[in-house]
Image: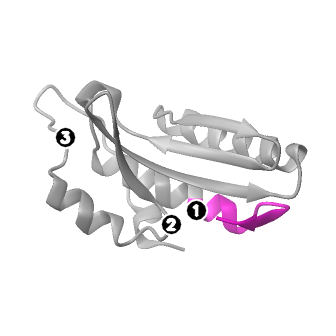
């Protein structure tokens, strides 16, 4: 289990700021297979998980949805036949917060126990 996944998410306040590129790079080192990207000028964190079939991919997407609801922090999930792409960012900050890295680590924890996971 990644130590990040045991960290607590914190609510963003009016004074919260997106992480710097240096902070993101440091946290990314704790998340094998995750990538930093930018969409519409917003930094995002993404990873694709491969499964044996659609049913297993959908089940994983639903598990990610459950942990997202529990934290009130929701990713973009793209579920396809045998593949789920998860993309985290903090909408309110138009970038990345430590919470995104925590949730990415929790997503990896779910994947370790996911049925049919081929690789990621």
Sequence-earlier tag: 3 or 2: 3
Residue furthest to the left in view is 15
45, above or below 58, in the image: below
Residue closer to the observer: 49 or 98:
49
Q: Quadrant of the C terminus?
A: bottom right
The verdict on residue 109 being magenta is yes
According to the image, label 2 marks what residue? 33
Q: Which residue: 50% across, 66% down?
A: 33
- Asked which secondary structure carries label 3, the reply is loop
Would residue 15 appear left or right of 24 to someone viewing this image?
A: left
According to the image, label 1 marks what residue? 108
Whole-percent x and y of residue 19?
19, 48
According to the image, label 3 marks what residue? 18
Q: Are marks 1 and 2 in contact (CB under 8 Å)?
A: yes
Whole-percent x and y of residue 25?
25, 63
- Asked which secondary structure carries label 2, the reply is loop
Q: Which residue: 25% across, 57% down?
A: 24
């Amino acid at each position: 289990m990644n130590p990040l996944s045991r960290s607590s998410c914190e609510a963003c306040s009016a004074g919260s700021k997106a992480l710097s590129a240096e902070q993101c790079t440091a946290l990314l080192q704790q998340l094998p297979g995750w990538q930093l990207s930018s969409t519409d000028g917003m930094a995002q964190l993404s990873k694709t998980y491969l499964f044996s079939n659609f049913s297993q991919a959908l089940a994983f997407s639903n598990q990610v949805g459950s942990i997202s609801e529990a934290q009130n922090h929701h990713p973009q999930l793209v579920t396809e036949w045998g593949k789920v792409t998860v993309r985290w960012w903090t909408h309110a900050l138009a970038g990345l917060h430590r919470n995104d890295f925590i949730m990415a680590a929790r997503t990896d924890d779910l994947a370790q126990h996911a049925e049919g996971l081929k690789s990621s």
